[in-house]
């Protein structure tokens, strides 16, 4: 090999090394795009999608744990997020009736309209509770189709997860096996957790609960608790002083175990009733982000049942002590 050939060979080797380094750097710097862009209405569904979708999904929630999901402004940023979504996951049964239809119209995204795989309402996949006997607007913002807060019963999560993964596999069939694997893993862990929670709430069975808003039908059903009164007797309408005073009279001699309200709700009425009846009032997280330590579905129920147990069992101990 002559001198000129050696120089050409060295240049060729150098060129190959340079191209290899350049391509590797380019691949590393390229953004990783999700296979499914998901718009969720509430944090609980964002958490569930993340469990089932892993690194194949990019998920956004329109609300936080400290926002009222009934009342959301149709901001331009929400419209933009919805316009790029492949999948919409919301509660349904008119929980989002005040803002979701407007967002859908303005986003004009054919992927997430009714009857498309990308349009998913959790409440359509469980047995609904709280169906009103009479539809009367004078009674406030009554949900005609039933109570929409289906996530407050952990058993419902299993049913919703099974239905949701089917949609995800339809939207992204190339990763169907991955989504099923993620779901199977989640459901195995969920089954174990539900068994633990069932054991935990056995001690709470029959406890008398006053709720601030009718958000808890499914939770009460799961834990076999008795709802004895509602502070917000007409949903969406400010509580009257007359109703509050009637509750004071009602529970002057027939006490309840605890008053509960969600973290996003104004606790003023619950606190007022606590001061005048001596019934302890507690804040439950309600969804992910409701309290700082609630970061996923598992910690949501861990914290909810811990707070309930602490309040109810402590109250029972105090009552036993005062009777002796």
Image: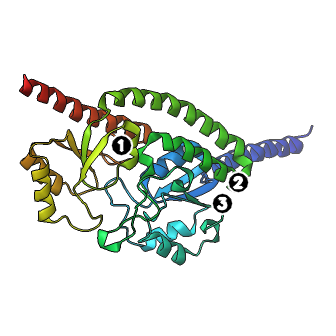
| Numbered badge on residue 220 | 1
- SS assignment at label 3: loop
Q: Is residue 183 above or below residue 81?
A: above
Query: Which sits in the foreground, 46 or 241?
Result: 241
Q: CA distance from mark 3 to mark 1?
A: 32 Å
Between discs 1 and 2, the one toward the N terminus: 2
The chosen color scheme is: rainbow
Image position, residue 284 (x, y; %): 28, 45
On the image, numbered disc 3 is attached to which residue? 117
* N-terminal-most mark, 3 or 1: 3
Residue with the most extreme top position: 324
Residue visible at 50% across and 28% down?
Answer: 192
* Residue at the spot 49% in from the left edge and 61% down from the top edge: 92
Position of 15 with respect to 135 (left or right) is right
On the image, the x and y values in percent for residue 71 come to 35, 67
Where does label 2 land, which residue? 170
> Of the numbered discs in the image, which one, if any, rests on residue 40?
none
Residue 297 left/right relative to 253: right
Work out whether residue 6 or residue 321 is closer to the camera in this orientation and state it.
321
Pointer 2 local density, CA inside 10 Å: few below 14, some 14–19, many at least 20: few
Measure how far apart labels 1 and 2 are at the Cα level. 35 Å
Query: Taking the image as drawn, is residue 9 in sight?
Result: yes
**Please, is residue 155 above or below residue 139 in the view?**
above
Please indicate, yes or no, whether residue 18 appears anywhere in the rendered image: no
The answer to whether marks 3 and 2 mark residues whose Cβ atoms lie closer than 8 Å is yes
Q: Quadrant of the N terminus?
A: top right
> Residue 101's spot in the image, x, y percent?
49, 73
Q: Earlier in the sequence, mark 3 or mark 2?
A: 3
């Amino acid at each position: 090999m002559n001198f000129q050939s050696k120089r050409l060979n060295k240049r060729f080797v150098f060129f190959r090394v340079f191209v290899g380094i350049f391509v590797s750097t380019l691949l590393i710097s390229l953004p990783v795009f999700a296979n499914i862009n998901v718009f969720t209405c509430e944090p609980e569904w964002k958490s569930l999608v993340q469990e089932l979708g892993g690194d194949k999904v990019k998920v956004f929630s329109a609300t936080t744990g400290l926002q009222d999901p009934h009342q959301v402004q149709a901001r331009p940023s929400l419209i933009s997020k919805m316009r790029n979504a492949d999948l919409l996951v919301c509660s349904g049964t008119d929980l989002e009736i005040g803002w979701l239809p407007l967002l859908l119209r303005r986003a004009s995204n054919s992927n997430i309209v009714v009857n498309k795989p990308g349009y998913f309402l959790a409440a359509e996949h469980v047995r609904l509770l709280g169906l009103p006997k009479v539809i009367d607007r004078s009674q406030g913002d009554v949900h005609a189709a039933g109570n929409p807060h289906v996530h407050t019963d952990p058993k419902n999560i299993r049913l919703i997860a099974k239905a949701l993964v089917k949609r995800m596999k339809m939207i992204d069939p190339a990763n169907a096996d991955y989504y099923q694997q993620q779901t199977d893993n989640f459901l195995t862990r969920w089954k174990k957790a539900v068994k633990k929670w069932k054991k935990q709430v056995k001690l709470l069975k029959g406890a008398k609960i006053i709720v601030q808003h009718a958000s808890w039908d499914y939770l009460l059903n799961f834990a076999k608790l008795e709802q004895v009164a509602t502070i917000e007797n007409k949903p969406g309408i400010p509580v009257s002083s007359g109703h509050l005073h009637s509750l004071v009279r009602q529970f002057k001699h027939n006490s309840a175990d605890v008053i509960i309200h969600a973290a996003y709700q104004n606790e003023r009425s619950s606190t007022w009733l606590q001061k005048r009846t001596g019934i302890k009032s507690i804040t439950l997280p309600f969804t992910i982000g409701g309290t700082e330590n609630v970061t996923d579905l598992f910690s949501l129920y861990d914290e909810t049942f811990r707070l309930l147990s602490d309040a109810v069992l402590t109250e029972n101990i105090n009552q036993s002590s005062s009777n002796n």
